[in-house]
Amino acid sequence: MSGETIEEAIDNVVAHLKIEHDIDVVFDDEEFGAYYHDAKIIGINTNESLREQLYVLLHEAGHAILKIEHKKYLETRDETLQSKLSLLREEMEAWKEGRSLAEKMDIDINEGAWAMFCKQNLEDYIEWATS
């Protein structure tokens, strides 16, 4: 990780989110990975490994970047197929934005672990969207 630990990478992303977007990050064992756009908060579950916390943080930062910088996915969603597919697209784009942020911040990511983590998380959304 360019000489930095996972903890330092997490701290750097947290600082970046605060400075660039005025987003606070809450770490708690009762949180789950989520970006609350209106509240400008990202929640991270501390029961996850540090690597998973970093990956979730980057992913949720991806959501913030999509909404704040790109003005995308701001619409209210419902349970229609079109809405579900929009959410699935957002999830995929958030993973890409998170990976791009890691690259911009010179955070070294284990590509195999990242790909597997993305796949596992996207599979849950695909199952939900097709149900």
Image (cartoon, rainbow, N blue to C red):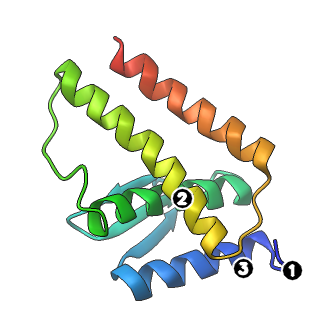
Cα–Cα gap, marks 2 and 3: 17 Å
Within 10 Å of disc 1 (Cα), the crowding (few <14, some 14-19, many 20+) is few
Q: Quadrant of the N terminus?
A: bottom right
Residues at discs 1 and 2 in contact (Cβ within 8 Å): no
54 sits to left or right of 58: right
* Type of amino acid under label 3: Glu
Question: Quick one: 44 or 118, which is closer to the camera?
Answer: 118
Tell me the number on the disc at residue 98: 2
Secondary element at tag 2: helix
Counting from the top left corner in percent of width and height, residue 116 is at: 71, 36
70 lies left or right of 125: left
The spot of residue 6 in percent (x, y) is 75, 69
Q: Residue 120 is drawn in which quadrant?
A: top right
Res. 109 image quadrant: bottom right
Q: Mark on residue 47?
A: none
**Which marked residue is nearer to the observer: mark 2 or mark 3?**
2
What's the residue at 25%, 54% (across, down)? 72
The disc at residue 3 is: 1
Nearer the observer: mark 3 or 1; the answer is 1
Relative to the observer, which residue lies in front, 123 or 94?
94
Residue 8: mark in rendering: 3
Distance (Cα) linking label 1 and label 2: 20 Å
**Mark 2 neighbour density, 10 Å: few (under 14) some (14–19) many (20 or more):** many
Residue 113 placement, left or right of 97: right
* Res 45 seen here: no
Q: Reply above or below: 75 against 20.
A: above
Residue 2 rendering spot, x and y as whole percentages:
83, 77
What residue is rendered at 30% in x and 27% in y? 85
For label 3, the crowd category at 10 Å Cα-Cα, with few meaning under 14, some 14 to 19 and many 20 or more, is: few
* Amino acid carrying mark 1 in the image: Gly
